[in-house]
Structure formats: C-alpha cells, structure tokens
Image (cartoon, rainbow, N blue to C red):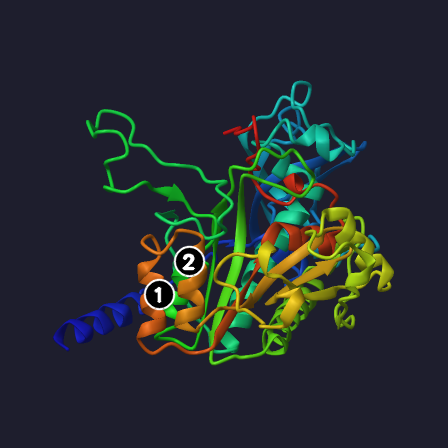
Amino acid sequence: MLGARCLLRAVRFCSSVPCPRHKPSAKLSVRDTLGAQNMSGERVTVQGWVRSVRSQKEVLFLHVNDGSSLESLQVVADSSLDSRELTFGSSVEVQGQLVKSPSKGQNVELKAENIKVIGNCDAKTFPIRYKERHPLEYLRQYPHLRCRTNILGSILRIRSEATAAIHSFFKDSGFVHIHTPIITSNDCEGAGELFQLHAAGKIKVPEENFFNVPAYLTVSGQLHLEVMSGAFTQVFTFGPTFRAENSQSRRHLAEFYMIEAEISFVDSLQDLMQVMEKLFKATTMMVLSNCPEDVKLCYKFIAPGQKIRTYAEKQLFNWGIDLQTEHEKYLVKHCGNIPVFVINYPLALKPFYMRDNEDGPQHTVAAVDLLVPGVGELFGGGLREERYHFLEERLARSRLTEVYQWYLDLRRFGSVPHGGFGMGFERYLQCILGVDNIKDVIPFPRFPHSCLL
C-alpha cells in the first residue's frame, strides 16, 4: 500500500512539471497522420521510408510510408533542399506542419520544415524497383526485403488483423487460450511426417537421450488440447506446426500456423460445424471491415456471409478412396463455388481418435472437412472417441496402447463427449485474398530445400 502511494505521488509530481513554451512536434504514424481531423497547422514528426521522390522547379514532393497503412503521406518541401540522399527506399524523419491538401484523394499533407535522412538506400542496386510491380515469385528470392513492397505489406497487415480477429472471436465466445508445446513426444496425425529433434553444439548428450524419449516438432496441438478440455469446456490454441512432407505444392509448407479448438459436451458434428462457420465468417468480416484498401489490392476475395452448406454426394467417387486436391476443388465447384462441408469419412482414412459412427458396412467416423474455393481443405475436425472400450480396441489394433496409455486415462477419469477442429491459417489467407501460392502469405516460408534467413 505504501509503495502504491509513493508511485501515485511520483506520477502527480511528474504531471505538475511545467511544459516548455514551444510545444514539441507530436510523433505520429502515417496512418494516424492521414486520418487526422482538425489538426491543420499542427507541428508533427513522421518517420518512415521514401516511396517516391519528385522534384519540380520550386517544390519537392516525397511520399513516405511506415507500414501502418497502404497509403503513403505526401510531404511537400522547398526545392532548394539537398535531395541527393532522398532516394527510393531511404529512411527519413520529417518534421513540419500539417496542412490541408489541395490534391484529390488525400485529406492532409505535410509541409516539411526539416527532413533528416536516417539511412541511405542505393536505388541502383536495390532489388526492388520504383514503380515496378514485381512478380511474387521474384520477391521470394528476397525474404529480407520483400515486406517493403505494397503487396506484401498489405498481406502482412491483413495477416495481423486476421490474427487479432481470431483471438477476439474465441475470447468473445468464452474459449480459454492454451499454449500447447512445440516440442512433443507424440505424432498426432499418425502420418510419420515429423521433424525429430537432436541436441547439437557443445552439450554432450547421448543420441536421442536429451528427453529420454524421442522428441519431435509438433504437427498439431490437438491431443494437448484434449487434455485441457477435461478441465475447461472450450479451449483453443494458435501457433506454429511442422510437417516433414516433401512437397513443393502451392498449398504446403514445412512450417505453418494452425488454429485449433476443442469443445467438451458436444455430441453432434452440427455443433462443431456451427463454430467453424462462425469463426470463418467473423474473421473475414473483421478483415474486410478493417483492411478494405489492403484487401482491394489483392487479386480477389470472398465476401462474408456466404451460405455454407453440407454436401456429401459420395457416389461421385469410389467409396473408401481419400479425397485428393482435385476432388476437393471439384466438389466446391459442383456446389456453386462456395465453402462446403464434407462429413462422415470412412474409418480407415482417419486417425484412431475419430468417433466410430457404428453405421454398418460403410463404417464411417464422425469427421468433417470444410472445403473452400481455390484451396480445397481449409478446416478439418470431428468428434473424438470418448468411449473407453472403442478407443482401447482401435489403439490395440494399431499397436499404440502403450504409447497412448495417458490418452486412454482421459477416458477413464470423467470422460465426456467432445470434439474439435483445426484451421490452417495460411490457407485461410489464400482463400480470402485469392493468393495462389501459400509461400506468399507467410513472412518467412519454409519448404523442402529452402530455409532462407
């Protein structure tokens, strides 16, 4: 209590210190400056990178961007200013007065009083050229520089906004955020596409002995979320996952981000599908609302609120054969190019934890995938097998009983019907933005034979 009083007294003392006569210029982001209302004549400081330089007889025009918005701030300076170091890509600090802009399409511009070059940029050797729209394939060669382009800047701002929207959705829906481990001793998917860990450097540890068991980079946080769903009825995680899949396709990465959720006391796929649909729509609506200019810059996007419907016309394909990407895209197209759910997959195609539907000869499990235009599978999920004896039999047939004894224990002590799903974050961004290659919606893509930076 005494410490709090001392702190409060110190704050009051600080606030009573007299201000200098000349009000210092306020430091604003480009976004805040462009959105300024009733600030004409105010002195401000803006820091960022030069996007363009145009010199006329009496006036020098700069466009400065700091990544806070797609639009750049126009800076107007006297032509007598030494502009030799003001080149495309150079970093600057500009002090001056905000004035109403006579130009159409912008509210204010900055009348410069002082321009300080913080860092030079040799435009001749800079791989990103002024006024040139580089192909995304070209920009992948420069992961340390491509974020300075308009298109990657927009994608990364949208990525940030989508991340916030997802967290907001789960928080507002009463979910508890769980930090599931990146290092794990289990293979959740059962596909064996794992990165195994070994100690390196000066630590002298016998091979495969650091954790006393083989350890891997996680392919999913699902099993750890299932542990937590025994104490919290709604949980989710959002983090990196890893697959050692030797694929160079446009929709696969070795490192990517997953949103995963587990919900207790659910006993129907419809309950899960409603949450999946709400998450998809709420996130997309927030992105479209908060990043309209960035979204417009991308090739195309899906409007929010499109109807998602269940479709499972299995006679289109040979029963028991897993859906390939071309099958998924065909189903979406067949249903009118809208997101579509596919439910009740053959038991043999899904992992041991999926709930047996006990439906006779077809023998399906309560699994669900959400397929979307241009991408294929976006969500995957299902009900979990909560019945001890069913799960015990499936583990025994797969010879996994000893490894997953702890998982069986969850069914022995207060088991409840439950289910969950996962959504690939990068595939989601591909879907709403129409970006063809998954490598262009993540800051630093990792894939076979490529780990730049």
In-front residue for pair 201/31: 201
> Whole-percent x and y of residue 263?
48, 74
Residue 330 in view:
yes
Disc 1 marks which residue? Answer: 408
Circles 2, 1 touching at the beta carbon (< 8 Å) = yes
In-front residue for pair 179/229: 229
- The residue carrying pointer 1 sits among few (fewer than 14), some (14 to 19) or many (20 or more) residues within 10 Å by Cα, namely many
Q: Is residue 51 left or right of residue 246?
A: right
| Quadrant (top left/top right/bottom left/bottom right) for the N terminus | bottom left
**From the viewer's perspective, is the residue at label 2 or at label 1 nearer?**
2
Which residue is painted at 60% across and 25% down in the image? 121
Instruction: Tell which residue pokes out farthest to the front in this image.
Output: 361
As helix, strand or loop, the secondary structure at mark 1 comes to: helix
As helix, strand or loop, the secondary structure at mark 2 comes to: helix
Which residue is painted at 62% across and 50% down in the image? 426
Q: Is residue 60 above or below residue 320?
A: above
- Give the spatial CA distance, label 2 vs label 1: 9 Å
Q: Earlier in the sequence, mark 2 or mark 1?
A: 2
- Residue type, label 1: Leu
> Whole-percent x and y of residue 49?
61, 38
- Residue type, label 2: Leu
Which residue is painted at 55% across and 59% down in the image? 163
Q: Is residue 259 above or below residue 311?
A: above
In-front residue for pair 361/202: 361
Disc 2 marks which residue? Answer: 395
In-front residue for pair 281/76: 281
Q: Is residue 87 above or below residue 345?
A: above
Q: Is residue 227 left or right of residue 139?
A: left
Q: Which mark is residue 371?
A: none
